[in-house]
Amino acid sequence: MAETVDPALQDPEVYDVLVLGAGMAGLATGHALLEDDLDVLVLEARDRLGGRVHTDRQFAGFPLELGAEFIHGERAATWRWVDRLGLATVHWTKLDDSWVRLADGRRLTMREARAVSPALDVTRTWELPEVPPRPLESFGDYLRRVGFDRERLDYVRRAFANAAGESMRFLDATATLAYLNATDLDGLEDYRIVEGYGAIVEALGVGLDIETRTVVNRVRWGAQGVTVTTDDGREFRGRTAVITLPLGVLQAGDVTFDPPLPAPKRQALAGLGMGPVAKFVYRFAEPLTPDEIQAVYAAGNPPMWWSPSAPHPTTEAVVWSALVSGDGLVELTRVSEEDALERALEAFRREVGRPGLRPLQAKLVDWSADPFARGGYSHVRPGHHGARELLAEPTPPLFWAGEATAPEERAATVHGALLTGERAAVEVRRALERMGARVVGEDDGAATAGAEPVV
Ligand SMILES: Cc1cc2nc3c(=O)[nH]c(=O)nc-3n(C[C@H](O)[C@H](O)[C@H](O)COP(=O)(O)OP(=O)(O)OC[C@H]3O[C@@H](n4cnc5c(N)ncnc54)[C@H](O)[C@@H]3O)c2cc1C
């Protein structure tokens, strides 16, 4: 579209790049453009940076993750920042150091449980037959068709779909299988950052021009550039804009595009889903499990518990969190927040065998109720494999980043978001060069989400 410079865009009030959203993707875009001779402004609705990365330092006296918690994979792009900032990490051996409740009611360590029930190995080995998925098939239907019994399905629900952020009937089979086939791309191990993910957010924000408490509600775009309006009536003009807003915010229509986005972009938005995801967090007065047990795969709801304090070298606090998504979360949050916290705790009491257990503090962090997230993370809806690529496609002067635009194997992660931000920076820099802008920084030619970016 906009290949020549409109005289109006020579206006000094016009930024070269407006970046919408200061989560990992938006911050990565801004950071990657720092070396360039470009005017970049980041617009962020919240009064903090990081978006779905939110390290809390109040609740328990140590850095506690209310959003993203783990680095998924020993080769994830996030490690570049961990190394650069000299951050400490702790390896989380969730599959070994955990209790699991079997279908017959027994509670065993995961090691013991795998020996008695091969069903529990299913989310490690996956061993799926060579049966191709059908075009509109959900992952749940696919697993049933290839012969998964009730016990295996139940374990996949607890140990995989819950973490995937949505119930299996809403996950596209083709996309999920593509993910499973590529999971060792970035590695299979999980790590926590001792100082918290917030340390990376802070570092990414250094040197950037960021307007916080700035809620974008309208984007006018065309050959003349981009005009962004906020809910308090301010206007920002850019020659280009990088949209990193969460999928849920875009789908809800909280931001109007004028003219409306082209059909492929709307198809992409319809083909993706933003599952309900929450964390239930409790602080207790004393340890509840032996030191080596840091996670609990529960039979009840919530199905997945872990202790962020267990491996923490700087705290004596005892904190347990549950991650809940999909139908499980909908069921738990039909009642008031206080009752939901109590219902989830009741399930935990049964798992750890402590009927009278009371927390010192409890907190529900429901990302689906957060107006600037509107869900946990994205998934591909049945029949829509390829929607992420469509969403990522540039529509100059608009460019697209954020976890939902990452390839399936990296979507819904911090490192995926980082890489999409860096990919969008390359795209926008090239577009500005074509428009005749002075862009001094290095273009490493890495215009793909998997390429080595500029740290
Ligand atoms: C509970 C939970 C646990 C997770 N656990 C992990 C994990 O362990 N490991 C992992 O790798 N990933 C995890 N994730 C996923 C990870 O957090 C995300 O993939 C990643 O942070 C998304 O970054 P983003 O920049 O794409 O989006 P966001 O972080 O959502 O950034 C978008 C920004 O846009 C802003 N915004 C929204 N609306 C507007 C508006 N109208 N105007 C201006 N700004 C607006 C938002 O406030 C936000 O700052 C988890 C997510 C959740 C919710």
Image (cartoon, rainbow, N blue to C red):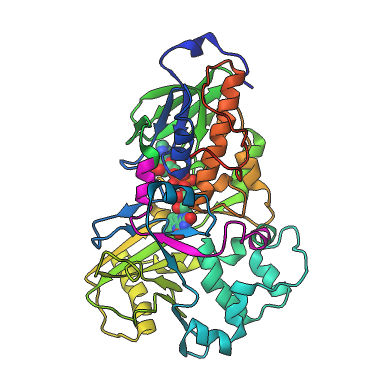
Q: Nearer the viewer, residue 348 or 447?
A: 447
Residue at x-position 36% and y-position 57%: 66
As drawn, 251 above or below 188:
above
Residue at the image position 61 percent from the left and 55 percent from the top: 409
Query: In this picture, is 292 found above or below 401?
Result: below
Q: Exactly how many numbered labels are in the figure?
A: 0
Compared with 65, 13 (above or below) is above
Whether residue 374 is visible to the viewer of this picture, yes or no, is no
Magenta region: 178-203
Where is residue 146 shown, x and y percent of the image? 73, 74
Q: Is residue 98 left or right of residue 438?
A: left
Residue 135 within the segment the image draws in magenta:
no
Q: Nearer the viewer, residue 83 or 344?
A: 83
Q: Residue at x 58, y 29 (%)?
A: 443
Judging depth in this view, the residue of 304 and 257 nearest the camera is 304
Q: Is residue 224 left or right of residue 384?
A: left
Give x and y (percent) for residue 85: 38, 47
Residue, far top: 7
Quarter occupied by residue 437: top right
Q: Nearer the viewer, residue 301 or 436?
A: 436
Horizontal side, residue 201 vs residue 176: left or right: left
What residue is rendered at 30% in x and 85% in y? Answer: 354
Residue 188 covered by magenta stretch: yes
Residue 451 rendering spot, x and y as whole percentages: 61, 43
- Image x and y of residue 22, in percent: 41, 39
Question: In the rendered image, which quarter contains the N terminus?
Answer: top right
Residue 383 seen by the camera? yes
